[in-house]
Amino acid sequence: MPRDGRLQRMESVAMMAPRPGISVIVPAYNAESAIDRCLDALSLQTLPPTMVEVIVVDDGSSDDTAARVRAHPSVRLIGQEHTGPAAARNLGVQHAAGEIVLFTDSDCAAAPDWIERMVAPFALGQQGGDDRPVVGVKGAYLTRQRELMARFVQMEYEEKYDHMARLESIDFVDTYAAGYRHDVFVTNGGFDTVFPDASVEDQEFSFRLAGLGHRMVFVPEARVYHMGHPKDLWTYARRKAKIGYWKVLVVRRYPRKLARDSHTPQSLKVQIALVGLVVFCLLGSLLWHPLKWVAVTSSIAFVLSTMAFVRKQWSRDSAVAILSPLFLLVRALALGVGFAAGVVAQLFR
């Protein structure tokens, strides 16, 4: 992709400046198996190294993460007690020199042009009919994993990306490939450290910015290869349940997002409701037998709700498409159970 003239000017200024214009922050916790690939990919970017600084925040790892990071002399290493990725990213921003801060995860390997594509919207300014300046950017996942479950997870993301790519602005930025203007990030308090591990702290922050009228955009060409898609159904279900649990806190703060956001398919919400209805009616049928027919009808409706996803994915990966109704059932059930547990936890706080 030819570089925009303004991006070239930004590069020239950054090369002459006493500090880099872009800071990439990577939180890492017990990441010794993946951190080298992450940092190697960041060292092979299309933008000159003088433009970019890379900061790894070691979140109290008990393995050789810190030693492996020190083997990359151009990378800054900062350590903290194990307090979670939200706190680690915030600490990284405190030490960042760049006017733009980018985030990726230790189990992600950025494509060679990832940084260039992530920063382009900040330099290009107005795009489309929205004249607000861009303050946040979201990139996309790719994966080279071949496990069946991991391939399904990638298809999930692709479904969301297809929708987001049509929007002039978004309200949902994931930190595996995220970018913000440094001053906007700091002024608005950064990530909320009430979230103790990787869950929905990135959702909450982007919802916060969107609620204040800030503009964020999706750049599907800014890609990172994820090495950590769930490989089995149990791991996948646990991850979704955790997201559902912490989503309760986000919904309490931003109740309108329960109805719609730029990332979550409406079909997912329908499926969660249908699965909840099936479970309720099956239990209720023990007391009132006719409820079992409501459960049967809801089950059929659930299967029908998955058909659009199955049809869309059939040409991409027929094996995953065939199993998608099962995977979507597990997704809806896990998110619903996690959300219910989160509601109960909030009630007793």
Image (tube, grey):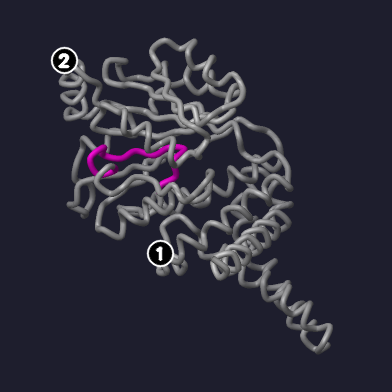
Residue 193 badge: none
For marks 1 and 2, give the one nearer the viewer: 1
User: Are circles 1 and 2 on residues that touch, CB within 8 Å?
Assistant: no
**Left or right of 22 in this view: 333:** right
Magenta span of residues: 173-185
- Specify the amino acid type for callout 1: Arg
The quarter of the picture where the C terminus appears is: bottom right
Looking at the rendered structure, the secondary structure element under dot 2 is helix
**Left or right of 166 in this view: 159:** right
Find out whether residue 331 is within the magenta segment.
Answer: no
- Specify the amino acid type for callout 2: Met
Find out whether residue 184 is within the magenta segment.
Answer: yes
Q: Which residue is mark 2?
A: 16
Q: Residue at x 58, y 42 (%)?
A: 154
* In the image, residue 92 above or below residue 294: above
* In the image, residue 15 above or below residue 248: above
Position of residue 237 measured from the top left corner of the image (x, y, whole percent): 68, 51
Which quadrant of the structure image shows residue 335? bottom right
Q: Which residue is mark 1?
A: 253
Residue 207 shows in this picture: yes
* In the image, residue 133 above or below residue 212: above
